[in-house]
Image (tube, coloured by chain):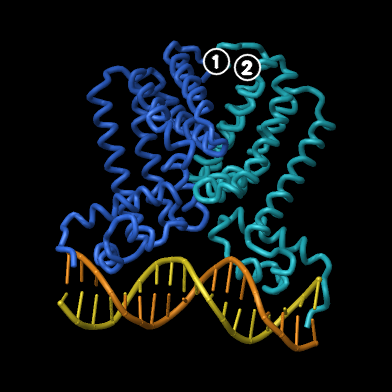
Chain colours: A cyan, B blue, C orange, D yellow
Amino acid sequence: MPAPNPQNRQKIIATADRLFYQSGYHQTAFSDIVNNSGVARGNIYYHFKTKQALLTAVIEARLTRIKTLLDDWNGRYRTPVQRLHRFVNTLHDHANSLPYYGCPLGSLNTELGKTQPALQKKAKALLTTYEGWLTDQFAELGYAGKAQELALRCLALGQGISLISHAYRDVELLQRERLYMLAWIDRLAAGKDECI
Amino acid sequence: MPAPNPQNRQKIIATADRLFYQSGYHQTAFSDIVNNSGVARGNIYYHFKTKQALLTAVIEARLTRIKTLLDDWNGRYRTPVQRLHRFVNTLHDHANSLPYYGCPLGSLNTELGKTQPALQKKAKALLTTYEGWLTDQFAELGYAGKAQELALRCLALGQGISLISHAYRDVELLQRERLYMLAWIDRLAAGKDECI
DNA sequence: GTCTATAATACGATAGAC
DNA sequence: GTCTATCGTATTATAGAC
């Protein structure tokens, strides 16, 4: 009989986070979380009354992680071009997972968007957080009037690349399109607005 | 007691096609197909031994529809620019469904890509069919060496736009980004290769 | 080919001991 | 807080009459 473990809540979230990403929300059963976290079934229900509540906690954990990441980038890089490049290179950071499970933000929103509008609304915050940060960068780059539009286009580019590289299981495509996105940022920075 | 209906097989496929799109494959139960098609449970299993077999038939139906569409475009439009514009305007044709259910090709590949590699491989053909046709168009446009790369980029752009417009439930974003894609095609046609 | 009834299992959630 | 045992339901799939 295992002793009480106050870190179980965190372990449940971390396991669910990984499994929801790798297998999808609906495709992940409570049994999977039990087996992979080592936390007993009933104990999970003590921490999270429903599966939706667990997903909500996972989304909040991802949201916190993203905000921490963006704060770190804000401190580490001074120019908007550096920051936008850093964002694009997220595709490189996750080159070992994106072609096999897709983007955790995009695939979750796609899944929930079909039949779970309430949960999708929460998951949407993952995208809008990036959108707000990207908007700041494009505004600072000199595109104040079109900053949000460019931010959403930047998000869409990343999502499209992630989706195709996932469907094709193609890491080379991922890297090539990442370079295309970097060049797109550079053209915007150079003010070649025929490309905007 | 209803009389035998030789068109039941087609009715099952059409209903499953719609529900798989609107609700997702795993989220659609056989009961849903029974209720929405009017075909009895056991009869569906007569036509399709498993749910996977039904999905395979749905994918083949979608594939046939796409090939018919591309053949029609080939006959209707003479220049590659016209044809590429016609492809991009698919976003406009489905402006009433894309923001609410996403792209039927992308969302299916995303869902199956997580846990159903065998089925995803079949669904991938939906994308490669478009890819092949797009490659032909970009080659004819004068980008023989980079035609496939541009084709995949075109697919990715469309997928990214569909995904974001779905997550945001935003039809205006869909239309705006469609215009961006049309302009992208025009720049390529004009040979402004700094945008390639 | 079509239908109803039902099997077999997997799932989310609960009860209650410790 | 943690655990085991179990409930009620929904799911895919089958059996067998017509």
Q: Secondary structure at mark 1?
A: helix
Q: Position of residue B9 (x, y in %)?
A: 23, 56
Q: Residues within 10 Å of mark 2 (few under 14, many from 20)?
A: some
**Above-or-below relation of A166 to B94:** below
Asked if labels 1 and 2 share a chain, the reply is no
Asked if the residue under mark 2 is in contact with the one under mark 1, i.e. CB atoms within 8 Å, the reply is yes
Which image quarter: residue B97?
top left
Q: Position of residue A195 (x, y in %)?
A: 56, 15
Q: Quadrant of the N terminus of chain B?
A: bottom left
Question: In front here: A193 or B98?
Answer: B98
What residue would you read off at disc 2? A187
Question: In front here: B160 or A189?
Answer: B160
What residue would you read off at disc 1? B194
**Above-or-below relation of B65 to A141:** below
Q: Secondary structure at mark 2?
A: helix
Name the mark nearer the viewer: 1 or 2.
Answer: 2
Q: Residues within 10 Å of mark 1 (few under 14, many from 20)?
A: few
What amino acid is at disc 1?
Answer: Glu
Which residue sits at x=69%, y=69%? Answer: A45
Which residue sits at x=73%, y=42%? Answer: A66
How far apart are the two marked residues, 1 and 2, measured between alpha carbons?
8 Å
**Above-or-below relation of B172 to A164:** above
Which image quarter: residue D16?
bottom left
Q: Position of residue A126 (x, y in %)?
A: 67, 41
Q: Is residue A125 left or right of residue B107?
A: right
Q: Say which chain tag 1 marks.
A: B
Which image quarter: residue B128?
top left
Which residue sits at x=53%, y=27%? Answer: B173
Q: Say which chain tag 2 marks.
A: A
Q: Position of residue A139 (x, y in %)?
A: 72, 19
